[in-house]
Image (cartoon, grey):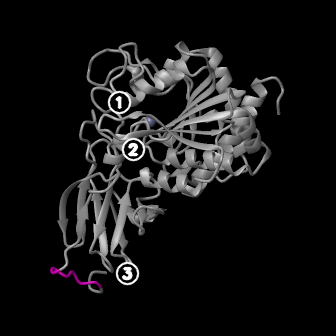
Amino acid sequence: MSTEHPVNPEHPVQVDTGFPGGNAVIERVEADRIVLRPDLRDTIGDWFYWCICVRGAQGRDLTVQVRRDGGPGIGVRGPAVSTDGGHHWTWLGADSVSGDEFSLTVPEHTTELRLSFGMSYTADHLERFLAANAAHGALERGLLTHSEQGRPVDLLRLGNLRGAPPRRVLLTGRHHACEMMASHVLEGLLAHVLGGDDVEARWLAEHVELVVVPFVDVDGVARGDQGKNRAPHDHARDYGPEGGLYPETRAIRQLLVNTGRFDAVLDLHCPNVAGPTNQRAYFVGSEGAENWEAVQRLAAALEEETATGPLEYRRADDLPFGTAWNGPANYLSRDGLETPLTSLDAFCADHGDIGTHAVLEFPYADAHGAEVNTATARAFGAALARALAQHLAGNGAGQG
Ligand SMILES: [Zn+2]
């Protein structure tokens, strides 16, 4: 209680967003109370990502109000908390939340605290992963292109990098900058292949070239943008016939058309915060029955692989094209114009030599009652690697 931790006006709580991934409009800081709302910047409509750094709050009982018009701004397990500068994260827990506020007691020796909607994954995390695997002979770091703001957009290659590999897969993350939990899945997948811990990982390393764009909207990830519904349209809707607004998506198109066959293209996302259908992982179908059948074969393998893991994926949760929000309206421009927009998934249906292409939504905090965190997300990524191996081996000439 505040009687135990009296407010010291000499040392006010300081809140800032001046770090990679930082996001919030700080409306008020009053003693032990912070009022913020997500910084929407160029977002059309409303979204929920925020991430702040709090200093000078050691030993205090802190309350943070997250104001949002269009839905909750705090996830189902409360906010994510980091006491080591955003490297490691835990959920504060649902019982810390009351309405649009949460409360916590900051430990006595915690001089700097990060609080966020989710478990941040920025360039710093990728750098640590790449540094830890720098000596691995089957991992190469290349350049896809440069972003509008001049940042290098990484293009990773791992697996079979000798000449023309028997199979090739493209994995993409952060078309929507804020969707950080998908990056933990992606890192878990890559770590599993590099680790070669099971027969599927070794099969992938031997038979597949994995081509990976970990941060498609690298500027948005660094700035802490929502990215979702960015005006006039976001990166995930930038694959239309008009040619593309963003250098990253233009480069991915070229990669798909010029490289040769891709046996699978998998685009990783996180869903909306609210709604009962979003506390689970699910594939989002595009038009085209033949590809959806292929996605369902991959889905069957993933269902089996996750059945005993920490996070379950169930095929029944998928959203085939034409169900729930996944209809033609989801691909109309959000600026009120009735212009159809094109996703990477839809682009794959019409361009290049591409096998199975899919969008996978991975939840922020909860999957069928199980806790989503960095460890369980990474385990899910390993299961996804095993499912991919089975899918690709099954689609081929019996190499298993
Ligand atoms: Zn998304």
Marks 2 and 1, the one that precedes in the sequence: 2
Residue placed under numbered mark 3 in the picture: 109
In the displayed image of the protein, which residue is found farthest to the left? Answer: 9
| Mark closer to the chain start, 1 or 3 | 3
Per the model, the C-alpha gap separating discs 2 and 1 is 12 Å
The residue where tag 2 is placed is 178
- For disc 2, does the CB lie below 8 Å from ligand 1? no
Q: Residue 397: percent from the left, percent from the top?
A: 81, 23
The amino acid type, in three-letter code, at marker 3 is: His
Q: Is mark 3 within 8 Å of ligand 1?
A: no
Q: Is residue 224 rendered to the left or right of residue 394?
A: left
The residue positioned 34% from the left and 53% from the top of the image is 20
Q: Locate residue 136, reporting x and y percent.
A: 64, 50
* Quarter holding residue 320: top right
For the magenta stretch, what is the residue range?
5-10
Q: CA distance from mark 1 to mark 3?
A: 41 Å
The front one of 370 and 17 is 17
Q: Secondary structure at mark 3?
A: loop
Q: Amino acid at mark 1?
A: Asp
Residue 177's place in the image compared with 229, above or below, is: below
Amino acid beneath label 2: Cys
Q: Earlier in the sequence, mark 3 or mark 2?
A: 3
